[in-house]
Amino acid sequence: MSVLILCLAGPLQSWGIASRHNTRSTRTAPTKSAVIGLLASALGRPRGADLSDLAAHDFGVRVDQPGELLVDYHIVTAASHSADPALQRLPTAAGSTLRPHESTKVTRRHYLTDAVFVAALQGPLTDPLAEALQAPRHPPYLGRRSCPPSRPILLANTDRYPTVKAALEGVEWQAGPAERRRHRTDDHVTCEIIIDDRNGDHHLTDVPLHSPPYQRRFGSRRVRHESVRIPAHPTNPSHDPMDLLG
């Protein structure tokens, strides 16, 4: 069965699980629900569609370049709550509403900057998913609409690897030029991988369940964390003029 291999790289990424309140955090690696959502969008599936066929694929992710955490400070007015100016007020716990000049709240939105991940899925739908990524029905983004990818997402759809883990062990290191310069004297780099495992000792609540578009529900999956050693230098190295600067 083929393995679909993706490169998730961009100036900003955000892979949240608990993102409904004032602090919208991000995990340090892509979630299964977000990657499934990206693929469903490429296929053109509407919000609220049943994604169980996509969620059934084995999934894994490799951290090639972890990036850094960025916290974006926002002030949000009640204008986002109603199109009617008379109703643009935030609710109170007592059931009334605040006055318009009081109807403002602070949010903090977390992002990963300059991160690069390799994601892999194995299952029966990798061929149509690969075709969709080459001509997506909707533009892809990395967790939030403000996070466009900086590279083509599709790396390969191949039967070269028997499992998701084998793919994450075999795909070339996808880190950017700056990260490669930091490892220029190293033969190998060590990357974390997170893979589906029914006997894994960690739980992640990031499996999309069939639910209304704005009342999304998620199931839990077991995962295993491991480390893999990847060659630090590509088989066919590309020219990087910045290397001349030492």
Image: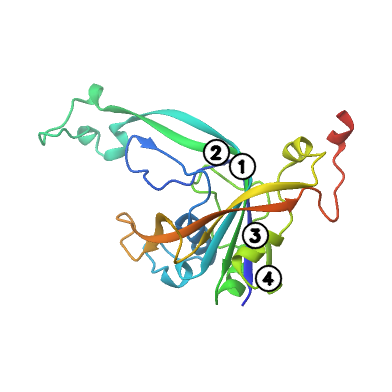
Q: CA distance from mark 4 to mark 2?
A: 29 Å
Where 229 falls versus 126 (above or below)? above
Where 180 falls versus 196 (above or below)? above
Residue in the picture at 55% in, 74% down? 123
Q: CA distance from mark 2 to mark 1?
A: 6 Å
SS at mark 1 in the image: strand
Q: Circle 1 sits on which residue?
A: 115
Q: Earlier in the sequence, mark 4 or mark 2?
A: 2
Colour basis: rainbow
Residue 229 image point, x, y percent: 70, 52
Disc 1 residue type?
Ala
Residue density around tag 3, few if under 14, some if 14–19, many if 20 or more, within 10 Å: many
Q: Circle 2 sits on which residue?
A: 112
150 or 207, which lies in front? 207
Q: CA distance from mark 3 to mark 1?
A: 17 Å
111 or 40, which lies in front? 111
47 or 234, which lies in front? 234
Tag of residue 161: 4
Residue in the picture at 60% in, 38% down? 67
Disc 3 residue type?
Leu
Task: Find out whether the residues at labels 3 and 2 contact each other: C-beta distance under 8 Å.
Answer: no
Residue density around tag 1, few if under 14, some if 14–19, many if 20 or more, within 10 Å: many
Disc 4 residue type?
Tyr
Residue 11 image point, x, y percent: 61, 39
For residue 135, say whether it is visible.
no
Tag of residue 168: 3
Residue density around tag 4, few if under 14, some if 14–19, many if 20 or more, within 10 Å: some
* Quadrant (top left/top right/bottom left/bottom right) for the C terminus: top right
SS at mark 3 in the image: helix
Disc 2 residue type?
Leu
Question: In the rendered image, which quarter is residue 85 located in?
Answer: top left
Residue 18 horizontal side relative to residue 59, left or right: left
